């Protein structure tokens, strides 16, 4: 410590005597600013990426839950493959740790015609115990429909895109045609309008009464298209999927034809897009770390070259290369820490403004959200800070070779 302190004093004294403090200050300022900007960009990139993943995941799971159980032959547009679901089987899934709710549903494809506008839709029938939390948060007008087991309701919930396309609003009637062996028409009343901003899904999804969907399919009360399983945490999907698979095997006499799909299987395009987003963020992290590291490296090298006479003098006095390098490293570490702290403060400020005031908007048709979403994860930010600091310090071990190459007998002569 005494050696490092002595060298630091010598460097400062030399700095005053040489009249180069202004140039040195400019170099350190640029290096510190680069670290601050790079840190702010990395934190912002990760927070915005996490925000996108959270928002899109919540929207996707809002439509179908984290896990869907249905017939092996069922697709999103079909309704001809019902599965028998016993109350005991549903209760067994509900009892699993991490399961928030289990909701039966029935599909029935149909066609809506309003004037010259025609749109294919899927009537998704749900029951009185359905988890409306997602649609409640996405509701833009009207109210959520209420269903019971005794009466068939004609109330439906439609998307803002569908209502706009068909020029319908809350309280209007909507005629839906169902085509099987014959064409059947049913009149519904729009109870509410939701806006989830997932255009490919919500433009064709109509939420209705499960009793109505069963009636249109000709099913009894024991048959459904499948079950939606909503979880407390997205991270529990693999574990709970395995538990449900074990339950299906145990109840193979009833549910042998069931298929288990996770949210990643149901909407692969959405999650492929999110994986691409993760890759882009990784590229940003690597580039910003490299930029900050090389900027700090160039700044330290410039200072070293300016201090060659001092370094030569210290070497002549018996100071080791490692001790001299530690002095430069200690000064650089303080500068890096200051840059990281300033970068954190700037990033937190910008991200907080966006999170609470939604300053920067987006086109939901392209990005699935109206504003740039932000999700601040303190553990990830700490990891970014520590990793960046460690990697930049590794860059700064390069000047050790330049210090070792300084010849005391020649460098002392340098004016």
Image (cartoon, grey):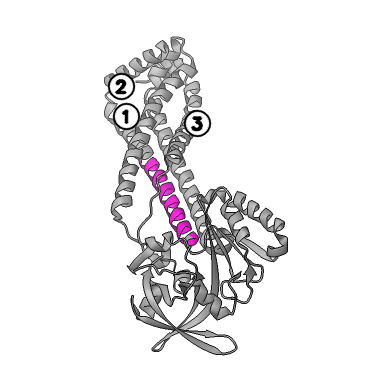
- Most foreground residue, 326 or 186: 186
Q: Secondary structure at mark 3?
A: helix
Q: Write the residue at 36% across / 65% down.
A: 139
- The disc, 1 or 2, on the residue closer to the chain's N-terminal end is 2
**319 or 380, which lies in front?**
380
Camera-nearest label, 3 or 1: 3
Residue sitting at x 50%, y 50%: 232
Pick the quarter of the image with the C terminus.
top left
Taking depth in this image into account, of 125 and 274 the one nearest to the observer is 125
Task: Give residue 117's position: percent from left, percent from top.
Answer: 41, 85
User: Does the rendering let one see residue 294?
Assistant: no
Compared with residue 218, is residue 319 higher up or lower down, i.e. above or below?
above
> Any magenta on residue 50?
yes
How far apart marks 1 and 2 lie (CA) works out to 8 Å
For the view shown, which residue lies furthest in the front direction?
150
Q: Residues within 10 Å of mark 3 (few under 14, many from 20)?
A: few
Mark 1 lies on a secondary structure that is helix
Q: Which residue is mark 2?
A: 15
Disc on the earlier residue, 2 or 3: 2
Q: Which residues are magenta?
A: 37-61
């Amino acid at each position: 410590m005494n050696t490092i302190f002595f060298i630091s004093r010598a460097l400062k004294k030399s700095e005053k005597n040489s009249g180069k403090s202004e140039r040195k200050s400019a170099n350190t300022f640029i290096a510190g600013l680069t670290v601050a900007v790079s840190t702010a960009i990395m934190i912002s990139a990760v927070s915005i990426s996490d925000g996108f993943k959270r928002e899109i995941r919540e929207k996707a799971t809002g439509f179908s839950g984290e896990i869907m159980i249905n017939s092996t032959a069922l697709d999103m547009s079909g309704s001809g493959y019902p599965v028998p679901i016993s109350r005991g089987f549903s209760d067994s899934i509900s009892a699993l740790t991490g399961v928030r709710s289990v909701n039966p549903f029935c599909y029935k494809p149909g066609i809506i015609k309003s004037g010259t506008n025609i749109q294919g839709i899927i009537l998704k029938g749900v029951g009185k115990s359905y988890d409306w939390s997602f649609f409640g948060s996405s509701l833009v007008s009207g109210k959520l429909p209420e269903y019971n087991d005794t009466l068939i309701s004609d109330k439906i919930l439609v998307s803002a895109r569908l209502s706009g396309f068909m020029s319908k609003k809350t309280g209007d009637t909507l005629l839906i045609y169902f085509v099987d062996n014959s064409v059947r028409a049913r009149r519904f009343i729009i109870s509410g309008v939701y806006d989830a901003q997932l255009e490919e899904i919500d433009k064709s999804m109509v939420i209705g009464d499960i009793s109505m969907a069963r009636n249109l399919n000709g099913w009894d009360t024991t048959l459904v298209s499948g079950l939606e399983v909503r979880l407390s945490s997205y991270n529990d999907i693999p574990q709970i999927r395995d538990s449900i698979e074990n339950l299906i095997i145990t109840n193979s006499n009833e549910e042998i034809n069931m298929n288990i799909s996770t949210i990643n299987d149901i909407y692969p395009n959405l999650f492929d897009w999110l994986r691409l987003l993760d890759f882009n963020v990784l590229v940003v992290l690597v580039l910003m770390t490299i930029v900050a590291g090389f900027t700090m490296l160039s700044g330290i090298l410039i200072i070293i070259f300016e201090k060659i006479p001092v370094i030569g003098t210290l070497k002549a006095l018996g100071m080791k290369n490692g001790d001299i390098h530690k002095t430069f490293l200690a000064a650089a570490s303080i500068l890096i820490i200051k840059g990281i702290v300033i970068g954190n403060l700037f990033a937190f400020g910008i991200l907080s403004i966006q999170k609470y005031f939604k300053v920067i908007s987006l086109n939901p048709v392209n990005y699935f959200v109206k504003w740039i979403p932000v999700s601040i994860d303190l553990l990830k930010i700490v990891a970014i800070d520590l990793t960046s600091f460690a990697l930049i310090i590794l860059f700064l071990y390069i000047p050790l070779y330049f210090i070792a190459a300084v010849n005391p007998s020649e460098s002392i002569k340098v004016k």
